[in-house]
Amino acid sequence: MVLAIFEISPRPWYADKMRVIIYTGKGGVGKTSIAAATALRTAKLGHRTIVMSTDSAHSLGDSLEVPLSGDIQNIAPNLDAIEIDVLKEMETRWKEIEEYLSSFMRSQGLEGITAKEMAILPGMELMSALFYIWDFDRNDSYDVVIMDTAPTAETLRLLSFPDVSQWYMDRLSKLLKRILKLARFAMGRMSDIPLPDADFVDSMEMIGDRMMNVREILQDMERTSIRLVINPEKMVINETKRTYTYMSLYGLNVEALMVNRILPQDDASMCYFQEKMPEQEGYMKTITECFYPLKFYYSNQMPTEMLGVERLEVLADMLFADEDPITNHSKEKPMEFKQEGDMDVMSLRLPFSQKSDVQLFRKSKENLIVQVGSHKRNITLPLTLTHSKVVSAELEGERLLIRFKRTEDNGI
Ligand SMILES: Nc1ncnc2c1ncn2[C@@H]1O[C@H](COP(=O)(O)OP(=O)(O)OP(=O)(O)O)[C@@H](O)[C@H]1O
Ligand SMILES: [Mg+2]
């Protein structure tokens, strides 16, 4: 099925490097809707676009009102879409691994259970999506890749690639142990365990090599940005702050914040939402304190669900107005972590800073308030820094460098 939706503009001349936009955020905040709306807009502007859902509870097809599958499908001019299907990926991309798992299970007398089902590990959708990115880049298939991701910290960690093949091996070995336990329980015995063959080993190496290539794309600030989707609600803000810190800790470029479901101020809806307005104002202020200087995009709470092209276009209008959604607003990482001897250094981009006083307050183990002149920033510290002492804070150009020393006790 192809959406009959719009007239497209000619392909822009500047689309020379594939752009990757990754949406993430807490459950239900509007990631899928915003990913779909962005894709419709970039396609309309003439960018060859693909939108990929890596959330196993797929709803991208529902949002676009077009049935999607684990195969890439053209749904509109310039617009392809896929809902990554791990079972299908197991049959193709992870075939050697599946074969080894099958032989492993057979050796333990577990014929009935399909290796495919057992071998699905958390994060495999995202990993498969990263393989696709590698493919698309090599073949110049698209100008823009838009990803809608599941919001779990563990899978997002994959984006940082400390060592993805190691990550996979660890999980695989846990899985093998689980199968052994199951075999002992079901059959009361343990048989010889088959050794992985050369194909399996090659395929693990291949995963490692490819991931190194994808890493280059994801760490390239000109191409890849993480966009956090948020709602003006307390719990959502807290969790998103944490995600922001961890994405930064992993060296990723958090570029923008999509503030969705803002209660509108217009007269008609005012009565209905009036009570909630002061609370929302407070949350909007907190959002500015916590996420400045990211680029902010705003969209209102609509009276109906964001389903179908027409409504998604309204969402895209609210978010982007006349702007091309592929515009990259981040030239420097907003938050970075480095090691300097035995010190941990947190570097924050604070473009508003003049050479004014810097004050730090530790609200709790993981919450640091930075006050520079009249500007306040509220930062969540990563776990590694919760038991550390701030030893200095100084402005260097547009960046504030905060040095931490790890201690047994905590506090500032
Ligand atoms: N601005 C909005 N106004 C009204 N409804 C919205 C808005 N944004 C999203 N929705 C609706 O909220 C629900 C959740 O949105 P969506 O599926 O995009 O969120 P999500 O973050 O992808 O959720 P999940 O974490 O479950 O994948 C959907 O029914 C969607 O239509
Ligand atoms: Mg979703």
Image (tube, rainbow, N blue to C red):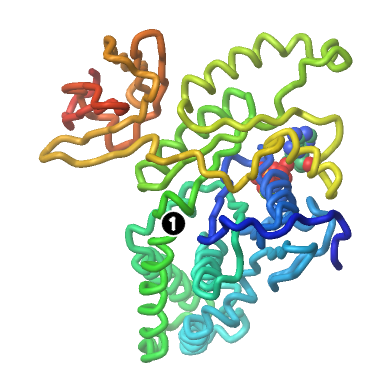
Task: Name the residue: 76% across, 68% down.
Answer: 74
207 vs 32, left or right, is: left
Quadrant of residue 376 within the rendered picture: top left
Amino acid carrying label 1: it is Leu
Ligand 1, image quadrant it occupies: top right
Disc 1: CA contacts within 10 A as few (<14), some (14-19) or many (>=20):
many
Quadrant of residue 409 within the rendered picture: top left
State the residue in front, 404 or 257.
Answer: 257
State the residue in front, 197 or 279.
Answer: 279
Kindly give the residue lying farthest to the left in the view shown: 341
Does residue 376 appear in this view?
A: yes
Q: Position of residue 355 (x, y in %)?
A: 27, 14
Q: Position of residue 137 (x, y in %)?
A: 51, 69
Task: Name the residue: 80% across, 43% down.
Answer: 313
Work out which quarter of the rendered image holds the N terminus and state it.
bottom right
Task: Name the residue: 52% across, 44% down.
Answer: 328
267 vs 378, left or right, is: right
Tag 1 residue: 218
